[in-house]
Structures are given as structure tokens and as C-alpha cells.
Amino acid sequence: MKYADHNSPLRRRSPLTPCLGFLLGCSIPLGFALAAPFHDDENRRVDDLAPIQQPWEADAELVEKLSSGQNQKFNYRESNVPQFNLPNVLGDNPAATSAADWKVRREQTLEQFRSQVYGRRPTLDVNIQFEAAPTSDHPDFWNGLQGEFSNLHCVIHADAREFRFPFVIAHPNSTELPVSKPRPLVLFINNRSQSEFTDADRLMEFWAVDQILAQGYSAAMVYTADIDPDRADGYATGVRGFLADNQPRDQDAWGSLSAWGWGISRVLDYALLDPNIDSKCIALVGHSRGGKTALWAAAEDPRISLVYSNESGCGGAALSRRRFGETVGRITTAFPHWFCDNFSSYAEEEDRLPVDQHQLIALLAPRGVYVASAADDLWADPRGEFESLVAAAPVFQLLGKDSIHTKQMPPLNSPRVEGVTGYHIRSGPHDLTRRDWS
């Protein structure tokens, strides 16, 4: 098929409205199930027995430990968070007061993120095809799972050149779960090399595909570095270098986060050719840099109905202006390839940014957004992730959707779901676990 990034036939025919059935079938019952702490009890509600919990606060000993030694140049103390003013999430001159106003403001905000943070994607036409991939492209972890797995390649042709990347798509076993209507798709952007997974159990801790299939949903997974290498010197061998024919980058040219999001959209191009997948019920899940990618991918692709961003931190859900844990200066030094070059100019000068991450979350409204943090992962600034979600609430409300709007953080291990948004902070370190998937 012919493809131009903002003018795809598949993109034009895809509705903007999230799947009400998916949100009713998942988010609202999850709100009841997850309102209690993370415990299993077949006979009684744990929250009826548990003591009243206090809103989450960072562990004082952990703060002291992280604030010593070489870490002293990074802030882990709330008392040291600077005073700042967030950009108006509804826009300025004037602020949006209606859905029609927001449509204009949204496009303006999207352009600011493109030019100053994630970079602008190319718009040239390319030919895209899909082929079956050799099974050797993926470890043989799928045997014994109740699903039908396919290894595939996305093949991109530009002139006489070719670029390809693999992905996996799985459907519930048709003999176990007969299809009576189109099913939701849960797509996972995997930021960890499959060589890190020595067996199926460890892989399914990070990608709970068995749980997804057991719900009767389809599942897909694509690995970030197969689309664009996750290293500063990888430009020439990834999709960015391929589409630019290895010409030098402009200051606002897309970084790897945006390239990974572009690859997600190509996986959706394939998945939505399947009539058994509901085009209105697409969930995207990402952890860490994958969580950053998931948020930006959904901002660029309105076909995504629901986003789960797990511990995405700086450049993801966390507010840059808080300068807590990882900062713009540090992330653009350590991972300059993730963003456009312009983003690095705001190092140590976050207040000059024309946008902040609450506006990224607002770009997803009125679709579903779930942000997750971990108590030991202060580098990702859990409070900044939560405050970002809260600060996006006016846009959800303007578009007629309830969302989390109270500024008090929930207790540890006590997820909060309000309307089409949700948040939890769980015990433990930076990771994606079955607890998070639940």
C-alpha cells in the first residue's frame, strides 16, 4: 500500500472515539477490582479489613540514600522542587472553552511537541507490505500458550531500497474462545531485547500475553530497537536513516521515540486489516522509554483508544518543570537520539519549554489514559507523573469525560480509576510486572 504519514487511508477511516465497550468492559470493572490493595482473597474484600492508608510519600531513607554520593547533582527532595508555572493545558490567546476550540488548540500543541520535543516525522510516500517472518526471528516461547501466534515482518520500500522490522501478533485460541464479535487488541511496545528473556515465564512477567489472550483479546508486540536502534550512533541503520536516505538531521527531525511510535502505527495498519479485531478497541502499553513512546504514539495516531504508560518519567508522563530525578539535561545527554535536537536546548532551562507533559496527556483526551509508577523508582518522579495526569483534567472535562482531578496521591498499591483515567503506584523498583498488568 502507499503510505504518507498523516494521510493514510487507514488513518482517515479510523474513528477518533474510544471504544465505550472496551472502557466499560475493562476500566470501570477494574476500578472496583483495583480499588483494594494488591491482594488476592476469594472470600472477602481486603479493603474491608485493611487499616486506613495514607497518601503515598517517598520513603525518607530512600530519599537520603539517593541524595548522597554521585547522585547529589539530581534532586530527590520535594522541598527542593523549584517554583514553576505550567503552561495552560487549554491553550492561550484565548484558552479553549469548547470542543471546537480545543480542536484548534490541540493541533497547535501537537506542533509544539513535534518541533521542540519528539521531532517531526517525514511525510514522503513509501510502499509498505507485510510478510511472514521466519520463526527464528523470535524465541520459541509460544508453545503451550492458549493462542495462535504469528511472526511477521513489516517491509518498507523506498525507491530501490528496503527496510524491514519484525513483530508478533496473537489471537485467542479459536477452539477455546470462539469469536462472536470483533475483539479488542492490546499492543505492547517492548523496550527490552528478547535476548534478556531466558524463558517464557520471564517474558510473560514483562509481557503478560497469556493474561491478555485469556480475556479473549488479541495481542501484539514489537521491539523498539528492531524499528530504530536504541543508541546514539544508530541513526544510519534504523528507519529514520532509511527514510532520510541517511541525509543529516534537521533540528526538528524525529527522534527514536517518534520512530518507534511510527512503527507501532504500521503494526496497527496490519492488525486492522483483520475483521476480527475491533478498530475502536485498541490499547497500547509501554514501560519506561516504551511508556514515553506509547504516549507520543497515541498523540500522533488517533486509532489508539487507551494508553497505559508505566514508569515513563522524564519525556513521558512526568512534568519536566519539576526537575525531580531525571532532568531534560540528563536525558538529552544520555539519550540524545530519543528526541529532536531542539529539546536539548532546554537543559537546565525547563521553564522556557513552550509545553510540558500534562499537555501530552491532554492530547489523548477524550481517550483512556492510565499512568503507573513504582515507589522505589524516584528517578522517574512518581509525583510528577501523577500531577501531570491531574493537570490534564480540564481538557478531559471540556470534552465531557470524567478524569482524575484531585491532587492528593492515592496510597501505595491502591489504584485509582476515575472516568477514563487511572493511576497507581506500587511497591518495588523500576520494572513492568504482572502486578502492573493486572
Image (cartoon, rainbow, N blue to C red):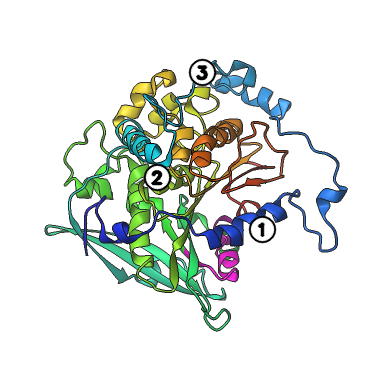
Badge 1: few (under 14), some or many (20 or more) residues near its Cα, within 10 Å? few
Q: Please name the residue that numbered disc 3 is placed on.
A: 84
Q: Please name the residue that numbered disc 1 is placed on.
A: 29
Q: Quadrant of residue 27?
A: bottom right
Query: Is 305 on the left-hand or right-hand side of 324?
Result: left
Instruction: Check if mark 2's residue and mark 3's residue have beta carbons within 8 Å.
Output: no
Is 211 part of what is drawn in magenta? yes
Q: Amino acid at mark 2?
A: Ala
Is residue 291 at least partly visible in the picture?
yes
Earlier sequence position, callout 1 versus callout 3: 1
Q: Is residue 350 above or below residue 424?
A: above
Badge 2: few (under 14), some or many (20 or more) residues near its Cα, within 10 Å? many
**Quadrant location of the N terminus?**
bottom left
Of residues 5 and 81, the one drawn nearer to the viewer in this rendering: 5
Q: Please name the residue that numbered disc 2 is placed on.
A: 299
What is the spatial separation of the Cα atoms under label 1 and label 2, in whole angstroms?
Answer: 26 Å
Mark toward the viewer: 1 or 3:
1
